[in-house]
Image (cartoon, helix red, strand yellow):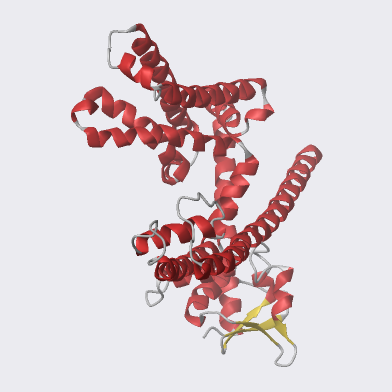
Amino acid sequence: MISPMDATAAGGPHTGQKILINVSGKKFQIYRDYLERYPQTLLGSSDLDTYFDPHYGDYFFDSNPEAFESIFDFYLYGKLYQPATIPNEMFQESVAFFRMMSVFEQEKAQEQEENVEVEAKTKLGRLRQKTNQILQNPSASFFGLLYGWVDLGCIFLSIVLMLFETDPNVVTILEDKSSVVSKVCFTMESITVIYFTFDVLLRFVVTYDKLDFVKHPATWLDIFTVGPYYLELFVDVTKFKSLKVLRIARIARVLKLIKKNKRLLLIATVLAQSVSELSMLVIVWSMCILVAGCSFYYLEETSNDQVQSGVDGLWWAVVTMSTVGYGDIAPFSTQGKLFGTVFVYVSMVFLALPLTIIVGAFSKQYESRKCMSLKKNQSAYQLKEAKSDE
């Protein structure tokens, strides 16, 4: 345990009050001004007061004390390390709870700003900055809007071309590689793929954090959508029918639209953050479908020729619980109809559950984005004012 004297020696002179932090029974003592050096973290913000226990006179957190030792040391020495005895997932949860990543994100942003200022002194650097601004914020300039519309045009052209090539009459014509239609389709597909490839390479060249760009899911989505085209240039897909399934990657180009719309990005973020709740809901759904499907089979097996096995019962349960109701399987017996009626109303309740989860998460995320945008604008204004005073 680090005493207050050790904290003073490690962090330098102090001017604040001494506070006591209780993490699942293990107590840590530190001067408050050390915490306030990092106001973006939980312990350095005003939110810390919500965890104050007036009965014991300390700030109580129900968290892992071993993981917190590393976080505590960060406020003293400025370095965050993961203890060898703590699993990675548990440590990441503690880091996320105490908002420690915001410190490193801020340092990363400052480092990028310094790189931008250095690059602005060269002609090539200024060109790189302008190109990056066009790609990241297309609505801010005419060339950005033009590039964005070209991008949307290529996406829609690729989708229309894919649908056109599925027409039975067109498929017959495309089998003749020397036909005009086949050549036009190949040329248009080549143009869209070349553009998508150019877009990925350009973004890689102008980005400041290339490792983060490579690890980003959107980058792999772009690569996945153009990969099959280059594979077909070197491999005859007609000889390998199993490779034809790779053409489904062209459908994924529709997902590129998510990057172009902030609202779609918000929905994707909400769904990603609600994975744990939705996965539990899927488990409950699966249990209900299994119980309902098997029950339906035993209720209808003697009076319904449509239900030949338990699998047919499961299919009826899936269609009924989703409120689609294809009508290919329906109950004939009285007990089956009564069971189906009850199951329909139960399905409506379970169908409404994910909507409440998603809407709640969406509202929370929307307000968070709104506050972040407001703070960003305020910071930009303050920075501009400070530079004008200089």
The quarter of the displayed image where residue 323 is located: bottom right
Do we see residue 127 in this rendering?
no
Could you say which quadrant of the image residue 237 lies in? top left
In front of the other: 314 or 235: 314
Q: Nearer the viewer, residue 163 or 263?
A: 163
Please give left or right for residue 119 compared with residue 291 in the image: right
Q: Is residue 30 above or below residue 166?
A: below
In the rendered image, the quadrant that contains the C terminus is top right
Number of on-image labels: 0
* Image spot of residue 306 (x, y percent): 40, 56
Q: Nearer the viewer, residue 374 or 163?
A: 163
Vertical placement of residue 299 versus 278, above or below: below
Q: Is residue 333 above or below residue 172?
A: below
Judge left or right: residue 224 versus residue 362.
Answer: left
Residue furthest to the left in view is: 239
Residue shown at 51% from the left, 78% from the top: 69
Is residue 130 visible in the rendered image? The answer is yes
Where is residue 42? Give x, y as percent: 65, 69
Identity of the residue drawn at 73% across and 55% down = 367
Q: Quadrant of residue 52?
A: bottom right
Residue located 47% across and 80% down the image: 66
Residue 109, given in percent of the width and then of the height, sits at 58, 47
- Seen at 74% across and 69% down, the residue is 46
Where residue 11 sits in the image (x, y, percent)?
A: 59, 72
Observer-nearest of 20 and 172 = 172
